[in-house]
Image: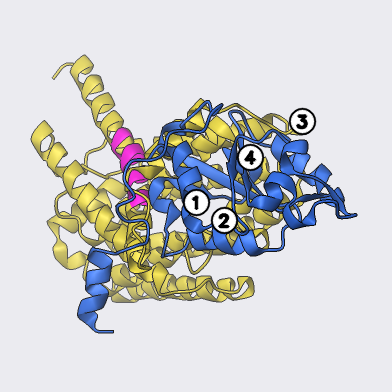
């Protein structure tokens, strides 16, 4: 790696999300585009950590979700939307509800991954209480097991409008 | 000049400084994030992202914990109010700010301290474990940084025979050799360490962390939401900008308006923006290449700052 290539990467970085075009239209039922600013709180409700890897990847240097105005935050009080992964296990029903109620209005919920949408391969498991929509109202769903970072970013952009 | 014109001029100058620092401070945060992203190989959020975030926060629901008392509600207001008062009277764009004779460096430090203490009390007020932990850490660091800052100011004010900030900046313009004096350099070196500690930057605190156990400043604001959080963000960015503005004006005073007049004041505002932006870029670059210090090693860093300031003060007394 030469100094020149490092400088070039700084001045004109390339990411996998270059040239994606206009943001997708907001999903049906979404009330706000939040003026290009979206703070997310992530809750793992019982995931296998596959979706976590993809979310981390979406915010890494390759996909760089932050350029669209989305950011992961440390507290539900700071968040506009909850990112929930995994089927909701019995032990996580309470914490998930509490986290949702701790968010100030307007608040939204992303269900990321097949498990969050319909329990996926864990359907009928003895520790599973249900899908995310059975516990908190879901606004946007992202399909995939695990979902591709591009799919996650498409969902985020439908809310940031960028 | 009539009394009315004087008052109107003072209000204009103070207002312009407050607005510049409030808006410019948010942009400064955006610039620093942008620089970090670029150095990490990312594109990063646009520079105006903190402005968008703030606008959105003020449209969100006002949400406060049930157990919180008026202390929790008052803390963000006090934080912003103290920052605004200090910005209004500080020599940021001009060496003749309104009420400049009351802009004593020691007084400014204590007014700013009022803001940090009120935020720590607000964090304690909710009774959450992280709030108390953040407050305790912030106060530990504050208690170590504050003496170093006071001694650094002492070192700067001995040769100038005053601790009045506008006069200190004016003397830097009038006698540039004072800036290169050993006591001023040592004191400003200590000032840099204290700015990093007080504004929660690396290596003392990581502003981007999501790990509650390592948080200092972020742990204190975990319970704030919506407009309250917006005020906290605004206050913090104003404080960072103010401290950087004072540092660059003491280090490179050129560009600051030394006479009254609208043109030189506007030039002063522009110079301030440029110098503070450069300082912010330098800090962001440094942050990319540095890690967070273990909490128990932070006192060593601050002790280093204190030693620098002490050496400066001793030099100032011996050289006289």
Toward the bottom, the furthest residue is A1
Q: How is the image coloured?
A: by chain
Q: Give the residue at mark 1.
A: A151
Element at label 3: loop
Q: Any idea which chain is the yellow one in this picture?
A: B
Quadrant position of the C terminus of chain B in the picture: bottom left
Q: Mark 2, chain letter?
A: A
Q: Is residue A112 above or below residue B137?
A: above
Q: Mark 1, chain letter?
A: A
Q: Are marks 1 and 2 in contact (CB under 8 Å)?
A: yes
Q: Give the residue at mark 2.
A: A147
Q: Are marks 2 and 3 in contact (CB under 8 Å)?
A: no
Of the pair B229 and B136, the residue shown nearer to us: B229
Q: Give the residue at mark 4.
A: A77
Q: CA distance from mark 1 to mark 3?
A: 38 Å
Q: Give the residue at mark 3.
A: B66
């Amino acid at each position: 790696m030469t100094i020149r290539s490092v400088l070039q990467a700084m001045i004109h970085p390339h990411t996998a999300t270059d040239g994606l075009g206009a943001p997708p239209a907001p999903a049906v039922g979404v009330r706000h585009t939040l003026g290009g600013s979206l703070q997310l709180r992530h809750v793992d409700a019982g995931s296998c950590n596959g979706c976590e890897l993809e979310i981390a990847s979406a915010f890494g240097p390759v996909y760089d979700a932050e350029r669209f105005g989305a950011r992961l935050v440390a507290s539900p009080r700071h968040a506009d939307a909850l990112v929930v992964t995994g089927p909701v296990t019995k032990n996580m029903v309470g914490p998930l509800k509490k986290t949702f109620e701790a968010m100030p209005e307007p608040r939204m919920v992303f269900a990321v991954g097949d498990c969050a949408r319909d329990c996926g391969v864990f359907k009928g498991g003895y520790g599973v209480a249900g899908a995310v929509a059975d516990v908190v109202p879901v606004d946007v769903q992202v399909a995939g097991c695990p979902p591709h970072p591009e799919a996650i970013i498409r969902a985020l952009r439908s809310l940031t409008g960028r | 000049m009539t009394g009315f014109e004087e008052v109107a001029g003072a209000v204009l100058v103070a207002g312009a400084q407050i607005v510049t620092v409030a808006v410019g401070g948010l942009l400064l945060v955006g610039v620093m994030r942008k620089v970090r992203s670029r150095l990490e190989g990312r594109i990063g959020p646009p520079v105006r992202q903190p402005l968008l975030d703030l606008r959105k926060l003020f449209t969100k629901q006002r949400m406060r914990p049930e157990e919180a008392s008026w202390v929790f509600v008052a803390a963000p207001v006090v934080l912003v109010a103290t920052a605004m008062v200090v910005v209004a009277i500080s020599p940021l764009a001009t060496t003749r700010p309104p009420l400049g004779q009351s802009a004593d460096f020691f007084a400014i430090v204590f007014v700013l301290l009022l803001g940090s203490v009120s935020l720590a009390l607000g964090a304690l007020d909710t009774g959450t474990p992280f709030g108390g932990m953040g407050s305790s850490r912030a106060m530990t660091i504050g208690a170590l940084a504050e003496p170093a800052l006071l001694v650094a100011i002492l070192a700067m004010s001995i040769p100038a025979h005053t601790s009045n900030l506008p006069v200190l900046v004016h003397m830097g313009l009038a006698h540039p050799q004072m800036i290169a004096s050993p006591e001023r350099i040592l004191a400003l070196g200590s000032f840099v360490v204290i700015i990093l500690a007080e504004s929660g930057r690396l290596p003392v605190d990581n502003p981007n962390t999501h790990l509650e156990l390592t948080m200092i400043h972020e742990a204190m604001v975990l319970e704030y939401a919506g407009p309250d959080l917006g005020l906290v963000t605004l206050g913090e960015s104003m404080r960072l900008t103010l401290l950087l503005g004072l540092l660059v004006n003491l280090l490179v005073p050129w560009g600051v308006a030394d006479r009254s007049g609208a043109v030189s004041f506007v030039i002063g505002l522009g110079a301030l923006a440029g110098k503070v932006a450069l300082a912010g870029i330098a800090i962001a670059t440094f942050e990319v290449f540095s890690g967070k210090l273990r909490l128990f090693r932070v006192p060593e860093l601050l002790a280093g700052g204190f030693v620098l300031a002490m050496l400066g003060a001793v030099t100032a007394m011996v050289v006289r």
